[in-house]
Image (spheres, helix red, strand yellow):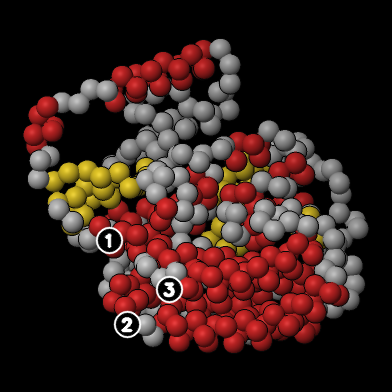
Amino acid sequence: MYGMKIDNHPKLDRLLLPEYSNFHPLRKGFKFEGDSVDDMNRTWEIEREADQKVSSTVLEHHRRDYFVNMGPQHPSTHGVLRLLLHMDGETILEIDPVIGYAHRADEKMGENGNYMQFYPYPSRVDYLAGMIYNWGYVGTVERAIGIEITERAQYIRVIVSELQRLASHLMWYGAFLMDVGSFTPFLYCFQDREEILDMFEMCDGSRLTYNYFRFGGQERDLSPEMLDRARKFIPMMKSHLKDYEKLVQKNIIFRKRTEGVGVITKDMAIQYGVTGASLRASGFAYDVRKSEPYGIYNQFEWDVPTATTGDAYGRFAVRVQEMWQSLRILEQALTRIPEGPYNNPAAPKRFKPNPGEFYFCVESPRGEMGIYLISDGTENPYRIKMRTPCYSNLQVIKDVGRKNFLADVVCILGSLDIVVPDVDR
């Protein structure tokens, strides 16, 4: 997208454009008109012609080992992701994730409007972590212009973010269990998740993609009814988590499907830039809320769950423990939330940050999400670059998937907890 080449790279493939394309859409000089459009059309025509030509020698060579397309319309990918599987019988030789089907140029859209016009977009990148992604964006801009956050607003951010983490993990829990053959937990998890979405609807008016955070605070306050419902939700969720443990974690069939499957070693995770539960399940206790505290997370007592196995079951167990820790944080925040303004009335409506580079990161349900911002002193961002966890976490499947069976691919992918728009952006 930029036309950059990296020396000594082991496998420098283009991710979103064909190898023979000669245009670079993310360069500032690229225009969506004239010659650039003609170049794009010629490239697509070459690609269509190439797809129609299959060499007979290639077909002869791959009689024993063969290729299978898993996706892009496969129920277990939970989005338009294509896994190109090179197989020998039921054994996987190579996995190549093919991305780009959901690419919407979110980062480019951020550069084409002013700072306030980008408010709604981050929650569309990871639609299961919208509140936390909202915080990632406003936190970056607040760092650039030096806005103070009121104490009540800080508590509100923690409360809605931890509820969001629970809602995301419940969605993943049910979908993952259904991927490996268990249907009942899916219904239980969605019932609990609906409680959280009802609370979000009370504070934001939306149930999936939110636009709640503002520079300096929130769009509106949390109502007493919403806070009371959140306090009642905590003991109910604790009771249900114990039921989940009896139903799933002690189930011998589930353990046989997940233990020892898709092992990510600590070195492999670090090399690929894996973050979140997928990293912590390999024994690395890295959580942005602890390692690089933001907001008021350092005022609460909670732990970073880890495992040492690095397999699908380890990633499952870490996320379950994370739900318990989110409930611990919520209990403390709901007890101690102070009165006062929910936003900073001095926050400007329009502004021009000083020229410079800024970075702010948050811990999403899938790992570290950060936004790198370059300001040129105007009302529009010069560059917005998102560091999303799913892009890095997905790449590790190339190494992890080898020598597993086809049936294990669904389990491995589900344990990584991928949201496809977060990969493609």
Q: In terms of secondary structure, where does tag 1 sit?
A: helix
Whole-Å distance between the Cαs marked 2 and 1?
Answer: 18 Å
- Picture disc at residue 316: 3
Disc with the residue nearer the chain's start (3 vs 2): 2
Residue under the point 39% across and 85% down? 250
Residue 375, quarter of the rendered image: top right
Asked whether 25 or 121 is in front, the reply is 121
Asked whether 378 or 324 is in front, the reply is 324
- Amino acid bearing label 1: Ala
Q: In terms of secondary structure, where does tag 2 sit?
A: helix
| Residue under label 1 | 407
Task: Tell me residue 140's x, y (percent).
Answer: 68, 54
* Mark 3 or 1: the one toward you: 1
- Picture disc at residue 262: none
Tally of numbered tags:
3
Whole-Å distance between the Cαs marked 3 and 2?
Answer: 15 Å
Residue 117, quarter of the rendered image: top right
Task: Tell me residue 419's x, y (percent).
Answer: 50, 54
Residue under the point 30% across and 66% down? 262
- Amino acid bearing label 3: Phe
Establish if 13 lies above or below 47. below
Residue under the point 37% across and 35% down? 14
| Residue under label 2 | 252
- Whether tag 3 and tag 1 are in contact, CB under 8 A, the answer is no
